[in-house]
Amino acid sequence: MSDGSIDLAKDARARAYATPLEEFNVADPELFRTDSFWPYFERLRKEDPVHYFAGAGTGEEDDIGPYWSVTRYKDIMEVDTSHQVFSSDAHLGGITLRNFDEDFVLPMFIAMDPPKHDVQRKTVSPIVSPANLALLEGTIRERVGEIFDALPRGETFDWVDKVSIELTTQMLATLFDFPWEERRKLTRWSDVATAVPGSGVIETEEQRREELLECLAYFTELWNQRVNGEGGNDLISMLAHGEATRNMEPFEYLGNIILLIVGGNDTTRNSITGGLLALSQNPDQEAKLRANPDLVTSMVPEIIRWQTPLAYMRRTALQDYELAGKTIRKGDKVAMWYVSGNRDETEIDNPNAFIIDRPRPRQHLSFGFGIHRCVGNRLAELQLKIVWEEILKRFPKIEVMGEPRRVYSSFVKGYETLPVRIPA
């Protein structure tokens, strides 16, 4: 950590402990852009682990309104595994604190409850089956190698663009069997789907809607090309031929496409960057890894815990429910802050440290729990494992040359840029 970062962390801590708890709006994207949210969650876990924020009534928060923050590991697990009480349904608001506009609701299987959730999820899950992952492994390794071999030596470049985005977008293009030369459209649609208006990605909700409708038109054409075919081993063919998905309404198709794009893009992309940053900040761990490359296996889940690429998931209470002594009312919004649960001192030993040989590295919340546990979790781990195996083969050192620029979002916890240099 640079001196500047240490000063910023001290300032954030002082502010967090000076602010009255009732004013805590941990969903403020600025806290995430500046990486200054940690002490706020630390304080909530200690003093008010199930915290009600009544809403600020100004600016960005108008879109969000009142919500509950669940910040401890065990309480998050309780909410996540109680889908009969806490709904994900898009028509009740879905999985982010900002509700869909009434005339632009995008149902998707992560934003559905059983039984519909179960049958739609089952339709696409064969693409991440162990057998299919074994088939994909060679392709991923080959592409990772090509990306790494083309990187410049002895000059500073943006790791996010040249490695994290490129690799995950190539993977998505393969899973969708998407036109290869147009694959960066997928990156754009992923960013547009999750961006806060005015953040530099999109300026208004109208712009988001226009671009997502372009996405729908593009994917509808791909659907029409494949619906009369034999039914290939790609996600669009699976949806077009699936019993539970072949008669989807256009917005439901778009919803599921956005889910698969964001799920396959943001999470892995930000963990690829986050892992490099974590090792740069923890040279003792990098030395340990280079001395024993087999530690990649336990390092990968530790990267995913340490990064927590999606900071929270939202649910809506279907009935009154008591959690940690607080009564959540029917209709209330509830945010499960995975990013806080992953640093819960009562559940995870030394949680703020990045430790690549933890005894139980998979003890984290980043993939969620219960019926909505991330369907592509093994694919994400496989990509990260290959990335680090190939880095260790090629590069004795990758130098981080400055602070990352972080995404202005409290949902996607990620990076816009990270300047790095590979010594010549």
Image (cartoon, rainbow, N blue to C red):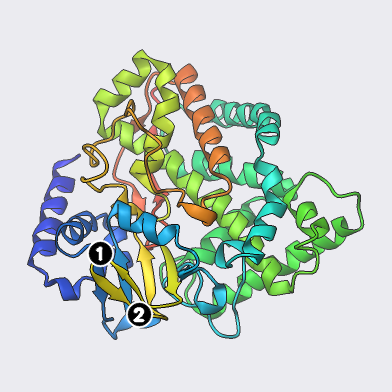
User: Vertical placement of 82 versus 401: above or below?
Assistant: below
The crowd level at tag 1 (other Cα within 10 Å; few <14, some 14-19, many 20+) is: few
Mark 1 and mark 2: Cα distance apart in space: 14 Å
At a point 47% along the width and 74% down the height, the residue shown is 203
Disc nearer the start of the sequence (1/2): 1
Query: Where's residue 399, x and y in %?
Result: 34, 30
Question: Which residue position holds label 2?
Answer: 329
Q: Quadrant of residue 13?
A: bottom left
Task: Tell me if residue 361 can be seen.
Answer: yes
Query: Where's residue 338, x and y in %?
Result: 36, 54
Task: Give the residue at the far top of this rendering.
Answer: 291
Q: Quadrant of residue 371?
A: bottom right
The crowd level at tag 2 (other Cα within 10 Å; few <14, some 14-19, many 20+) is: some
At a point 46% along the width and 44% down the height, the residue shown is 160
Query: Where's residue 303, x and y in %?
Result: 38, 37
Q: Quadrant of residue 280?
A: top left
Q: Choose between 155 and 201: the one closer to the eye.
A: 201
Is disc 2 placed on a helix, strand or loop? Answer: loop
Is disc 1 placed on a helix, strand or loop? Answer: loop
At a point 10% along the width and 52% down the height, the residue shown is 10
**What's under tag 1, amino acid-wise?**
Ala
Specify the label residue 190 is tagged with.
Answer: none
Task: Tell me if residue 197 can be seen.
Answer: no
Question: Which residue position holds label 1?
Answer: 324
**What's under tag 2, amino acid-wise?**
Arg
Query: How many numbered marks does the figure carry?
Result: 2
Quarter of the figure that contains the N terminus: top left
Instruction: Find out whether the residues at labels 1 and 2 contact each other: C-beta distance under 8 Å.
Output: no
Quarter of the figure that contains the C terminus: top left
Residue 214 lies left or right of residue 382; in this view the side is: right
Query: Where's residue 22, x and y in %?
Result: 17, 75
